[in-house]
Amino acid sequence: MQDRKLKRALELALWYLGRRALSCQQLQEKLARKGFELSEITAVVDKLKSWQLLDDRKFAEQFISSGSARGWGRRRIAFELTRRGVAKDIVEAASAEMLDEETEGENLHHRLQIYWKRIAKLPREKQYNRAMGYLLRRGFSLDEAKKAVKEKINQKS
């Protein structure tokens, strides 16, 4: 009975991972919701780690790459990874390795350029407020967002 349940947990975990990448915590939560016991979940996670099919570091790297492509800043990516259960030290190490300030600055200016077309006809104060909100919600730092928005507003005058 125990072996069948363990086999079923492993099959389900592989099915989940076949659909999309998951962090260890996400997989553990999904299996727990399906009614598997902690010992079974731990055994499945350990087996998947030994097969190198479950790795929070690789998950973080993939997530950073896709988050950056979506136009997210460093803070948004770190928040989303932490929310998905990736350890803070893994998030920091992967972010430091994969996100440099130059790329993030280019990403910020690119996002601002795209958004600016939507707000170009608004009064300056509304442009500033909306652009700041837009950039901050995407996880860019307050200082960088202020600097970029002020430059953009001053270009138009």
Image (tube, helix red, strand yellow):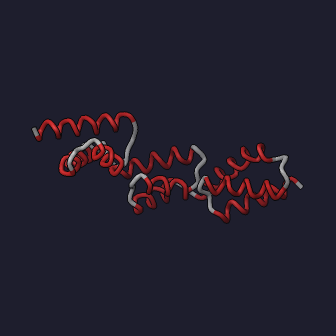
The answer to whether residue 116 is above or below residue 150 is above
The answer to whether 101 appears left or right of 38 in the picture is right
* Quadrant into which the N terminus falls: top left
Tell me what residue is drawn at x 62 percent, y 62 percent.
141
Locate residue 80, reporting x and y percent: 48, 53
At a point 25% along the width and 47% down the height, the residue shown is 45
Observer-nearest of 60 and 9: 9
Q: How many marks?
A: 0
Q: Image quadrant for the C terminus?
A: bottom right
Q: Position of residue 67 (x, y in %)?
A: 53, 47
92 shown above or below 31: below
Horizontal side, residue 16 vs residue 51: left or right: right
Residue 16 found in image quarter: top left
Q: Position of residue 5 (x, y in %)?
A: 16, 38
Q: Is residue 7 above or below residue 91?
A: above
Find the residue positioned furthest to the bottom: 143
Q: Of residues 101 and 54, which is closer to you in this image?
A: 54
Q: Is residue 27 left or right of residue 81?
A: left
Point out residue 65 in the picture as x, y percentages from the top left corner. 51, 46
Q: Give the residue at the far left of this rendering.
A: 1
Residue found 28% across the figure and 39% down from its top: 13
